[in-house]
Amino acid sequence: MGVTYPSAREQGLTDEIKQAIPHFRESPLFTPAEKAALQLADAMAGDHKKASYDEIFSELKKYYTEEQIVALGWKTGMWLGYGRLVHALDVPSVGGSCTIPLKSASGSAHWEET
C-alpha cells in the first residue's frame, strides 16, 4: 500500500518510512524525537490503559514543549477517532472526498436523522 495523500509525500513521507513505522523503535529512519512521538501514538492506539505514560512523557519532554506534546496527543486522538469512524461507517475510500452512506448494507440506518 502506497502513501495516499500528496501532502504526505510533499512533507517527506515515503513508502519506506511508512513500512518502517510498525518497527519504529529499531528503525534508523526515525530521529529520537520522532520515535518519542511515535511511542505516544503507539500507546494511544494500543492498550492505552496499560501504557507507561510517565516514561512516554519524560521522553517527549526531551524534544518537545508542553504545547507541542498536547498537540501531538490531540492530533493522534483525532486521527484515531477518524479512522474508527471511517471503519464504523464502512467508508470504502478516504483518498479524496467521499460520500458517507446513511444506511448500512442491510438497509438499517447507522444513525437517526433529526
Image (spheres, rainbow, N blue to C red):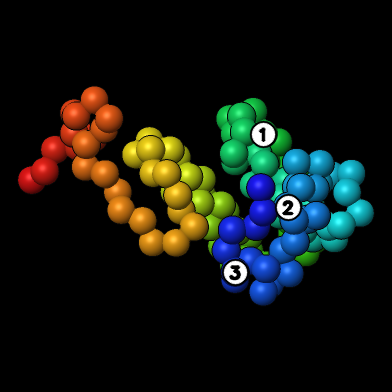
Which residue lies at the image location 83% right of the left edge and 57% below the top edge? Answer: 30
Dots 3, 1 in contact, CB < 8 A? no
Along the line of sight, the residue nearer the viewer: 52 or 108: 108
Which mark, residue 51? 1
Task: Identify the secondary structure beneath mark 3.
Answer: helix
Furthest residue toward bottom: 10
Q: Which residue is mark 3?
A: 6
Quadrant containing the C terminus is top left
Q: In the displayed structure, does residue 72 sit left or right of residue 29?
A: left
* Residue under the point 61% across and 29% down: 47
Q: Is residue 50 left or right of residue 23?
A: left
Q: Nearer the viewer, mark 3 or mark 1?
A: 3
Among the two numbered marks 3 and 1 on one chain, the one whose residue lies closer to the N terminus: 3
Q: Is residue 10 visible?
A: yes
Query: Residue flagged by tag 1: what amino acid is it?
Result: Ala
The residue at which mark 2 appears reads as: 18
As measured in the structure, the alpha-carbon distance from the residue carrying label 2 to the one carrying label 3 is 14 Å
Q: Which of these two is toward me, 5 or 23?
A: 5
